[in-house]
Amino acid sequence: MAAFVWLAARAAGQRDLLLERWGTVPETLFSPAADWLERIVDGRLLTLFSALFIHADWLHLLGNMLFLVIFGVPAERALAPWRFLLLFLFAGALANIAAAWSLDHPTSIIIGASGAVSAIIGAYLALFPRARLGLVLPLGLFLEFVRTPASLLIGIWALLQLLFTFIGPAFGPVAWWAHVTGFMLGVVFALLSRPAIARRLRQG
């Protein structure tokens, strides 16, 4: 949020330059370099991480924060803070690489934590497959509170992300593959972390 407020306070021209510098740009990321060290030194690989903390608008930011609160709090408690941070950063960076490969417009700027948040959602599903989430549904003139299996809601969400990887380009250069990649990485990471989580719970 601090990064968003800082960017929002800049003039439009300066903000565009900052987005181009710290967002992930496929054309820049995949441009020729002597080796990986050069890519690190010139900051190209750093943008895979810095882009996670930049958002296009308030709706983009608040949407990611809402999902992060719902799924991130229980996932962080189960994984422990350092595993949670590792998942967020590196799954988000790998999701940005997938998005950069998939976009038809090499000059598009990839920003936002959607890939990282998708990884958290995937980890939540793997860690709590039988969890239920509360929903408030409008039924005529009344609102009804119901508890729905999280696996059903997340499954529908995941299918929509996969669907939009094919029809999404018609709506603009949205990094749908970042969502799909992040989600799959989150599931795998959580499954691999289960033995360590079990040991930590026994010791605690």
Image (cartoon, rainbow, N blue to C red):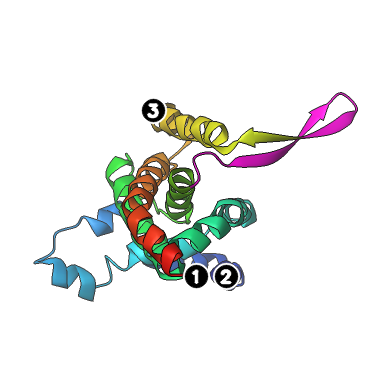
Q: Which numbered marker is on residue 166?
A: 3
**202 vs 10, nearest the viewer:** 202
Question: What residue is rendered at 21% in x and 76% in y?
Answer: 41
The residue where tag 2 is placed is 11
Q: Is residue 20 visible?
A: no
For label 2, the SS is loop
Q: Is residue 5 left or right of residue 196?
A: right
Q: In this view, does 3 lie to the left or right of 24?
A: right
Residue type beneath disc 3? Phe
Q: In this view, does 18 lie above or below 151?
A: below
**91 vs 72, nearest the viewer:** 72
Q: Do the residues labelled 1 and 2 touch (CB within 8 Å)?
A: yes
Name the quadrant containing residue 88. Answer: bottom left
Residue 26 percent location from the top left of the image: 29, 52
Question: What residue is rendered at 16% in x and 71% in y?
Answer: 38
| Nearer-N-terminus badge (2/3) | 2
Residue type beneath disc 1? Gln
For label 1, the SS is helix
Residue at the extreme front of the image, as rendered: 202
Magenta: main secondary structure equals strand
Q: In this view, does 44 lie above or below 183?
A: below
The residue where tag 1 is placed is 14
Residue 123 percent location from the top left of the image: 43, 49
